[in-house]
Amino acid sequence: GMPTLPPPVLAPRRQTRQLQVGSVGVGSQHPVSVQSMTTTVTADVNATLQQIAELTASGCDIVRVACPTQDDADALATIAAKSQIPVIADIHFQPKYVFAAIEAGCAAVRVNPGNIKKFDDKVKEIAHAARDHKTPIRIGVNAGSLDPRLLAKHGKATPEALVESALWEASLFAEHDFHDIKISVKHNDPVVMVRAYELLSEACDYPLHLGVTEAGPAFQGTIKSAVAFGALLRQGIGDTIRVSLSAPPVEEIKVGTQILQSLNLRPRKLEIVSCPSCGRAQVDVYTLAEEVTAGLEGMEVPLRVAVMGCVVNGPGEAREADLGVASGNGKGQIFVKGKVIKTVPEHQIVETLIDEAMRIAEETEAA
Ligand code: SF4
């Protein structure tokens, strides 16, 4: 048969240092990974592990948990030990929890230099503890909690201010010869955020964690994150991503995964190629596409399914896909790998497509 060519990507990855966050490699030699953050009270170990299990099942690579209290810090060891994916402790205010998280065996610790008071004095101790435990540190700069000195200097959270903060904190660790660092410079405005990461990528070779912070409810947050990550990944910038949504964290993973699949940065699984419908449509394309999508949800093998409303582009797209339907005259022509295998009445289109998809999936898995 024909050799399978690797799918095209928009840009080679920016070359970075490599990190090991638990079992997940982070940096230009590793795939871009998808992260989310639990919304449970971390000290509620069962609830947190339950949510981590759901995130793992939905494809999350690395999970972050908040650690605002001593009870949360006390829970970290159990959570880190029982989670199926690496756990990063997220510390905002108290350096003592950074040490607790490192001792607890967390795969990494995120610190927010703008929020951790007297952080600068503690860097040496943190660097030593992190080195002893091989724990990488993420320096997470956030527009909403920028160091007051930099806010005063730059007037507001400009890209330059975010980058200056991040590089300053990284340099404090570098003074102690600690370089297991990943950096984020998040802003809620995708334009500011993109510019900040561009500047940061030119100024250092640390791996970068991408995020549009406080991106909003699902629809707006999805768009803001997709355009910002796309603009950066198109330049090879970005080693881990987190889509921040005011929605359950599993939704963040679905969106993050879809962004990477869209850019061929991870293998595509189910892909529905459906037309927008128009005045020529001879079938209700919206309903058909929705029903097929729902019927095939969670399918783990790569499959392109074309759902087309009429015969203008229908046969062409259906032929390019693994499976497809082109509708007309109350009937659907079902295509498999470019050949019409049958013509069914409209009310049987969905079940026929689902049956055929299942059959193809079984064959693919058996092969
Ligand atoms: Fe319109 Fe047909 Fe194209 Fe769908 S496939 S958008 S119905 S012309």
Image: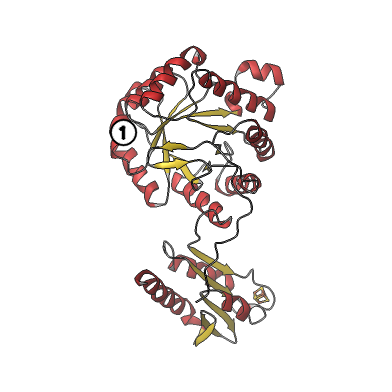
Where is residue 318 shown, x and y percent of the image? Answer: 57, 77
Q: Look at the image and tell me whether residue 173 can be seen.
A: yes
Query: Does 123 sit left or right of 87 as displayed?
Result: right
**Residue located at (69% from left, 24% from top):** 156
Is residue 20 or residue 252 the one in the foreground?
A: 20
Quadrant of the frame with the C terminus = bottom left
Image quadrant where residue 171 sits = top right
Relative height, residue 149 to residue 257 (above, below): above
Where is residue 103 shown, x and y percent of the image? Answer: 33, 24
Image quadrant where residue 125 sits = top left
Residue underneath mark 1: 44
Q: Look at the image and tell me whether residue 343 can be seen.
A: no
**Residue located at (56% from left, 85% from top):** 330
Relative height, residue 193 to residue 116 (above, below): below
Label 1 is placed on what type of residue? Answer: Asp
Q: Secondary structure at mark 1?
A: loop
Label 1: few (<14), some or many (≥20) within 10 Å? Answer: few
Where is residue 146 shown, x and y percent of the image? Answer: 60, 23
Query: Does 46 sit left or right of 210 as displayed?
Result: left
Give the quarter the ligand 1 occupies: bottom right
Is residue 277 or residue 113 the one in the foreground?
A: 113
Is residue 64 or residue 332 the one in the foreground?
A: 64
Where is residue 362 shown, x and y percent of the image? Answer: 36, 72
